[in-house]
Image (cartoon, rainbow, N blue to C red):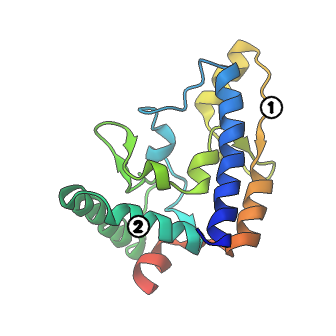
């Protein structure tokens, strides 16, 4: 593992520690296999660093030929929507198995996927409304991770995010 990969792993390990801390203290937390609301309602097609795209591409290449063909079909369909400017309000992640609600590339999923539902940002309202409702209803106290810190670390390590379109068409 090279130094950059190790640094990306370190960021992932810190994220996982925060996630585990929240899950241990809140057994009701909805983020687990089958809870795929965020995967079905992306605000836009994925934007990832080159390091993350490389991990995603490698994970997709390791899928069975049938599953890989399904993912590639979803990618192509989303690229058509982008080209025709017909992307809806929400985007379904092309790496989601919509039948099971499971991520097909879970171990290689992007940092944004790892932090969503456990980290918040002060600059946008991109967070899980289901969790917000549960936290408020329970009067629970949550020590959220800081998404802006993670985003800054990732950008310093791997550069600015690359759009889905640029990665798949112009790359």
Q: Please tell me the numbered disc located at residue 143.
A: 1
Secondary structure at numbered mark 2: helix
In the picture shown, does residue 144 fall above or below 139? below
Task: Give the Cα separation between the discs numbered 2 and 1.
Answer: 34 Å
Q: Residue at x 45, y 86 (%)?
A: 170
Q: Nearer the viewer, residue 163 or 65?
A: 65
Q: Residue at x 70, y 55 (%)?
A: 11
Q: Please tell me the numbered disc located at residue 58.
A: 2
Q: Nearer the viewer, residue 111 or 62?
A: 62
**Percent coordinates x, y for residue 140 in the rendering:** 76, 18
In the picture, measured across the screen, residue 79 lies left or right of residue 153, that is left
Q: Residue at x 64, y 26 (%)?
A: 23
Q: Please tell me the numbered disc located at residue 116.
A: none
> 10 Å neighbourhood of mark 2: few (<14), some, or many (≥20)?
few
In the picture, measured across the screen, residue 110 lies left or right of residue 18, that is left
**Percent coordinates x, y for residue 84 in the rendering:** 37, 74
């Amino acid at each position: 593992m090279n130094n950059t990969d190790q640094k990306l792993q370190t960021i992932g390990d810190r994220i996982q520690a925060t996630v585990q801390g929240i899950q241990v203290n809140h057994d009701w937390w909805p983020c687990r296999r089958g809870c795929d609301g965020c995967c079905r309602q992306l605000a836009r097609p994925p934007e990832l660093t080159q390091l993350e795209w490389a991990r995603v591409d490698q994970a997709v290449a390791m899928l069975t030929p049938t599953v890989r063909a399904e993912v590639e079909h979803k990618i192509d369909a989303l690229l058509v929507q982008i080209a025709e400017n017909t992307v809806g309000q929400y985007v379904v992640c092309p790496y989601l198995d919509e039948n099971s609600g499971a991520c097909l590339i879970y171990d290689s999923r992007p940092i944004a996927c790892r932090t969503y539902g456990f980290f918040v940002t002060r600059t946008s309202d991109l967070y899980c409304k289901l969790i917000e409702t549960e936290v408020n209803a329970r009067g629970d106290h949550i020590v959220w991770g800081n998404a802006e810190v993670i985003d800054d670390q990732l950008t310093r390590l791997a550069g600015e995010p690359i759009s889905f379109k640029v990665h798949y068409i112009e790359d």
